[in-house]
Image (tube, coloured by chain):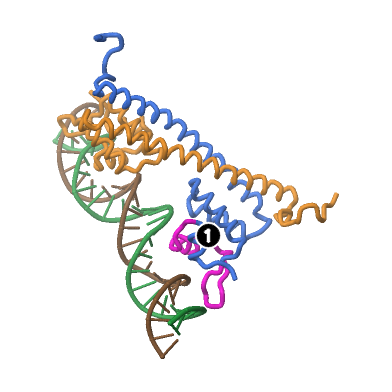
Chain colours: A orange, B blue, C brown, D green
Amino acid sequence: MGYTIGEVASKMRVSAYTLRYYDKEGLLPFVDRNKSGNRDFKESDFEWLAVITCLKNSGMPVKKIKQFVDWSMEGDTTLQQRLEVFEKHKKAVIDKITELNKHMEKIDYKIWYYQKAIDAGSEAIHSQQPCILAED
Amino acid sequence: MGYTIGEVASKMRVSAYTLRYYDKEGLLPFVDRNKSGNRDFKESDFEWLAVITCLKNSGMPVKKIKQFVDWSMEGDTTLQQRLEVFEKHKKAVIDKITELNKHMEKIDYKIWYYQKAIDAGSEAIHSQQPCILAED
DNA sequence: ATACAACTTAGAGTAAACTCTAAGTCAAAG
DNA sequence: CTTTGACTTAGAGTTTACTCTAAGTTGTAT
C-alpha cells in the first residue's frame, strides 16, 4: 500500500492537478497503478518528485525535465547526458543567483532613496545638486 | 531629439514589441511623443527602464510594477507605499536566492552521483549496501 | 515622385504551466 | 443498497508575458 495522489499532493505541497499535469506531460512514468487504476505512489517516488521539484523550482521548463526523465528510464547508456543536464543547469542557476544579487543592489539603493525622501518629506531632495543649498 | 523605440530596444536588449507591450500595460506613462506621434525616449527614461527591468527580472509581475509606476506618478503622497514595494520585494528576492542555493546543493549531489556512476560504468553502484560485497 | 525603412495601432496568436469541469469509477460507511 | 468522497480521464479555460500581423503613417534618399 503506497500513497494516493491526494496524500502525495499535500506532502509535496502541490495540487493533485499539478501532479496529474506532470504525469500527462510524461514526468512521472515510474508511478504505479493499483487494480482500480488509481495512481499508487511508492516511498521511492518521493525522491523522484524531490528531483523534479528541485529542477522546476530552480527554473527548468517541464519539457527539459521530461528529457531528463526519459533518459533516466533508458538506463546506463544515458549517464553522460544526465550528468550534462545537471552541469548545464548548475551554470544556469549560478547565473540566475548572480543576476538576482545584482538586482538586490538596485533594490537596496531604492530603499535608501525612499527612506531619504520620506525623511525629507519629498523626493525632490534627490534632484538637488550636491553641496549646493545645504540648509541646517 | 531623444531615442526611437528601436534604439531603446537594442540598447536595453529587449524587443520593440516588449516595450510597446509595457507601454500598453501602463508601465511607461512618462515616455513623450514627437509631432508625428512616435515615442520619443529621453535620457532620463533609461533610469526608469532600468528600474522596471530590475523589478521584472527579479520576478515582479507586470501588474505590480504598474502599481509602483502609478504611485510614482502620484508624487510625494505615495513615498511610503513605494518604499514598502521595495522592502517587500527585497524579502521576496532574498527568499528566492535562498531557495536557489538550497536547490544547488541537490544539483551538486546529482553531479557527484552521475560522475560516480560514469566512473563505475553503472548507476547500480549507488544501490549497493555500504561495506558489503566489496570486490577488489 | 516614389520607394523604403521605421514607426504607429488594434487585435490576434503563442507558449508555458497550470487549473478546472464534466462525466464516470470505485471502495467503504451508514 | 445507496450515498459519500476520492479517485479517473479528456479536454476546456486561465493567466502571464510576450510576439506577431495587418493596415496605415511619416521622413528621408534617390
**In this rendering, is residue B47 above or below A51?**
below
Residue B128 visible here: yes
Chain on which label 1 sits: B
- Asked if residue B121 lies left or right of residue B84, the reply is left
Quadrant showing the N terminus of chain A: top left
Residue B88: image quadrant is top right
- Asked if residue A66 lies left or right of residue C2, the reply is left
Q: Is residue B34 magenta?
A: yes
Say which element carries label 1.
Answer: loop
- Asked if residue A103 lies left or right of residue B15, the reply is right
Residue type at tag 1 = Leu
Q: Is residue B44 magenta?
A: no
Give the image location of residue A129, x and y in percent.
Answer: 76, 56
Residue occupying the point 67% across, 56% down: B77
Residue occupying the point 40% across, 35% down: A90
Residue indicated by mark 1: B27
Magenta stretch, residue numbers: B13-40
Residue A125: image quadrant is bottom right
Give the image location of residue A49, x and y in percent.
Answer: 32, 31
**In this rendering, is residue B106 above or below A110?**
above
Query: Which residue is nearer to you in this view: B121 or C8?
Result: B121
Give the image location of residue B15, x and y in percent.
Answer: 44, 60
